[in-house]
Amino acid sequence: MTELSGGPSLSQERRVVTAIPGPKSQELMARKQAAVAGGVSTTLPVFAVRAGGGVVEDVDGNSFIDLGSGIAVTTVGNSAQAVVRRASAQLEQFTHTCAMVTPYEVYVEVCEELAKLTPGDHEKKSALFNSGAEAVENAVKIARAYTKRQAVVVFDHAYHGRTNLTMALTAKNMPYKHGFGPFAPEIHRVPVAYPFRWPTGPENCAQEAAEQAIDKITKQIGAENVAAILIEPVLGEGGFIEPAKGFLPAIRQFAADNGIVFIADEIQSGFCRTGQWFACEDENIVPDLITTAKGIAGGLPLAAVTGRAEIMDAVHGGGLGGTYGGNPVACAAALGAIETMRELDLNAKAKRIEEIMKGRLTALQEKFDVVGEVRGRGAMIAIELVKPGTKEPNPEVTAAVAKHCHQAGVLILTTGTYGNVIRFLPPLVIGEDLLNEGLDVLEEAFAGLK
Ligand code: PLZ
């Protein structure tokens, strides 16, 4: 497995050799509790030492099948060879000059790649930042500077970050916003086409949701006051919601008709995750601006806003920046990650993962009536869990299934406004045997439910 990394002896296997968490992890957890702020919580209380391909190994020698990729980040696998090679070479050359002080080539190269890879053949420019939230904040700044308008439209179940502006853009109170107000003004929330939960059924969802959203924008805000409409083409933290087909094109068209900047937040869904470079390609959406992060740099912190040159250039000189934005080591890593995506054809891998997972999860749904829906695209797949015979969210069973998987050496993540969605975000380089073994464990978890 030459393309995988994490050290030559990292074997691609599930291995549980202690109780989870093991003794060394428990010791470290005690130190964490004493030294790390309580607000920084833990999904699986084991401490990682190595990771690569489809596994994460902990301090006690346990090896977990990785179905989370550190929340959709290590798409190319942990410590992917090209990422390590390019980032290490850059580390030897220089670590930082500040792109605003003396620029460097890798920053420009990443922006050139973004112009090529993002949808649309118009002239594009980019600016680089450190985190997804920072990219979203800057996309809003750019849209406001360009339109000279203030209002920003976001959607139910949206997640855009944890900074003050992005908390305001995010829908869910707990844990993201609770107690952290006051929030930024001029943010307006409208319905999203969530097929599984649409009151009149999935077949009416796209049209009715678009009508309601547009009606709210025109009646309550005034389209002429709206700088930007911001949406995740597949909503991530909201529960891997795929807006009903037709909804995104309708909203995109409305934005175009009203001089509103349409921003696709592809921070979670971008970079091969859904089997396309970007999820909005599935409905031929060409956004004005697109925000990216996570998968872009194989685990190093990098984020970007990419968009129409005339919009990006609406900001005055010095209006965009930050000490570390587009750090050279992170940029080199991004070039390594993009190289890996191309060379291993990770879009094809994502589609293959979808085929395997949809098959297995649909069978699971037929067997277990708590599985309300199987959805998602590529390697961004989820199951929504309900109380049997209803659509009532079932966060208890969700937590129990996650716990069983964790104890058995499979790292899965939950998500969703109602905490009742299990999401699967495997690294795209995961072996099929390992993926299937992870799904066997998941099935055991359901079979063992009381
Ligand atoms: N936009 C669509 O998914 C980050 C959040 C994890 P940052 N999602 C994971 C957590 O609980 O903090 C995300 C996203 C979308 C923006 C962001 C924010 O990206 O890099 O976490 O700031």
Image: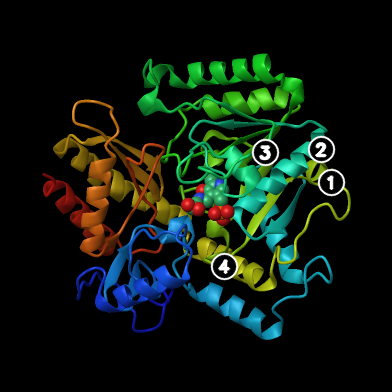
Query: Which residue is found at the position 46% from the left and 46% from the top?
Result: 175
Residue 372 position by quadrant = top left
Q: Position of residue 152 (x, y in %)?
A: 68, 32
Mark 3 crowdedness (10 Å alpha carbons): few <14, some 14-19, many ≥20: few
CA separation, marks 3 and 4? 29 Å
Which one is earlier in the sequence, the residue at label 1 or at label 3?
Answer: 3
Question: Mark 2 near mark 1, Cβ–Cβ under 8 Å?
Answer: yes
- Left or right side of 138 for 382: left
CA separation, marks 2 and 3? 19 Å
Which one is earlier in the sequence, the residue at label 1 or at label 4?
Answer: 4
The amino acid sitting under disc 1 is Val
Q: Of helix, strand and loop, which one carries label 3?
A: loop
Mark 1 crowdedness (10 Å alpha carbons): few <14, some 14-19, many ≥20: some
Residue topped by disc 1: 315
Q: Of helix, strand and loop, which one carries label 1?
A: loop
Which one is earlier in the sequence, the residue at label 2 or at label 1?
Answer: 2
Residue topped by disc 2: 146
Q: Position of residue 7 (x, y in %)?
A: 41, 82
Residue 289 position by quadrant = top right
Residue topped by disc 4: 300
Q: Of helix, strand and loop, which one carries label 4?
A: loop
- Left or right side of 239 for 82: right
The amino acid sitting under disc 4 is Leu
Q: Nearer the viewer, residue 12 or 160?
A: 160
